[in-house]
Image (cartoon, rainbow, N blue to C red):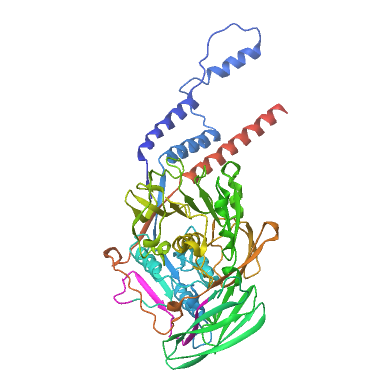
Amino acid sequence: MGLLNPGALVFLALVPALALAYLARERASRVTVSSVLAFRALHAMRRERFGGRPRFSWTFFLELLILTLAVLAMAEPYVVRHENPIAVVLDNSAQMQARTASGGTRLDKAKKELGAMLSTLPHTTAVTVYLTSPEPHQVNATRLALSQARSVVGEAAATDAPLDPGALVNLLTELSSDKRYAKVIFAGARALAPPVPPGITAITVGDPVQNFAIASFTLRRESFGAEALHARITVANFSPAPQTLTVTISGDGKRLGSAQSNLEPGATGAVEFPSLASANVYRAELTPSDGFPLDNVAYATSGSVKSVSILFVSPTPDDARGLASIPGVSVTTVAPDAFSPHELSSADVAIFEYAVPKEMPSVNSLLVMPPPGDPVFGFQTVPVKSAQITGWKTTDPLAYSVNFRLLNPNAGEAFGVHPWMAPVLDGREGALLLRGERQGHRFVATGFNLFPYLGKENLPMSILTLNVLGYLAGVGANSGGYRTGQPWLVPAGIETVTLPSGEKVAARPGTLFAQDASQGVYKLAGTGGKTTFRAVNFSDPGASDLLSAAPLKIESHAAAQKARTVTEKTPLTIYLFAAILALLALEGFAVYRRRSAVGA
């Protein structure tokens, strides 16, 4: 026990003053009286002079105790507690769903062994519990009692998101060097490479498991305007023997066909379905079954290759002609003076021609020949008579398959250095095309006009335009769906999302959706009864290899070489104030009762 502010004890000098106040009495004086009663009263007063015999009532001792407690509270007393808190990291990633030889899952085995280890610790041990999926996170904001920690571990469930080895290594390295923890216990499928830091105790449950997996499920349209889709499914054989794998595909619950692939150990192959009947949701299933059923199923939606809504803001709306001829594209035109930011809620991509919005757009946007000096983007431009392209980034997705030697942009403007947008195309006077990301959205700015879209009549410009719009709309990037555990952008006009479990949650367009990490099909509903579907799959070949997972390397720190005892100071001031309030209430109640009795 100790005091944080021992100097406050000087106020104990007030205790004698309290005693003097009780000893002080009024002195008697000589007066002329006209009755015996007054004489008797004066006679009694002469016997109670200052300095006479002390007559302390019980209230004196009560007030003395209150004063003493108040001084102690000012001194801020504390008690010292010696603890050996530990951190528990439980792997609840998708790989923990794999079945073991005993019949249960890896997670069941990990929880059983971890619970047995926790039961051997002193009941006073404080525990902080971490889970690894969909990303490493602490379960509770504060430390848990040992019994609470065992309950949290027992209730933990595996997600469908794959393990992020890098994030796990960073967490274990950080915890092993944290002086607040005497020990770190890790329970998971991945072994730790020697030498394991002394501050970490590992429980490894990742026995090798033979596994067959669907690595990807993608859809594309073979020709513009065709209803049938082409499906390509990549499969993998993570087993020690050759295997014939069969893929069966269905659409909206109806069987559409099956195909086989013969694979050597550790090999991957592709199964093609060149002409699938139209359906909203496609489901692929792989046989034979194995010990990890999650990656034996995958989903895809036709919506991933369907329409993109474009809002075209321009003083020359005729420049938007031709965009509607692009398969899967719908266009709405509006003049700059009639534009309102709420119109962006129904668009996937916005195009601002010769203008910029007054605030940062809430959707991915293309800015065509924007005016200089606007307060939102702050472009610095110089006019050019002939926007001749002198250089480009060949690896950039915007430059893919474009023959820039045949591209003649004509007059336009060149950009100066921009604070957050990088050049893709360069001219003699500066950059001619910029791209960058801000507030979770993609932006492209061009110093020459891409419109009107002329298709084959101007093939180089048309290819560049399709690259830009595809980059902004994400066309092609996610035709096979999205991965479990990774957030995705809520499309324009969407208000609710129905999870694979059937639960319906609210959503806001233009924001990242990361409320669920389950594999399956998500139903997106919006204004006007608009409904679309989004497929989310495990789709991680590296995580599907349950035979040869590399051990995790944890860096050793000198601070973690010895067991640590954490010392905590628990303040007692709050308890002293509570006692003072209780004593004041007791004294007030007693005085009130006494006055009530005298009055009666």
Say which of 159 and 462 sits in front. 462
Say which of 388 and 179 sits in front. 388
Q: Position of residue 71 (x, y in %)?
A: 43, 37
Q: Is residue 203 on the magenta stretch?
A: yes
Q: Residue furthest front?
A: 457
Say which of 22 and 330 sits in front. 330
**Quadrant in which the C terminus is drawn:** top right
The range drawn in magenta is 193-217
Q: Is residue 487 visible?
A: no
In this view, 37 is above or below 296: above
Say which of 163 and 36 sits in front. 163
In this view, 460 is above or below 263: above
Q: Residue furthest right?
A: 600
Q: Position of residue 504 (x, y in %)?
A: 65, 63
- Point 52% across, 79% down: residue: 232
Q: Is residue 341 on the magenta stretch?
A: no
- Point 65% across, 75% down: residue: 279
Numbered marks: total: 0
Q: Position of residue 226 (x, y in %)?
A: 61, 74
Q: For residue 407, which quarter of the picture? A: bottom left
Q: For residue 282, which quarter of the picture? A: bottom right
Q: Is residue 64 visible?
A: yes
Q: Residue furthest left?
A: 558
Q: Position of residue 549 (x, y in %)?
A: 39, 80
- Point 52% across, 44% down: residue: 357
Q: For residue 30, which quarter of the picture? A: top right
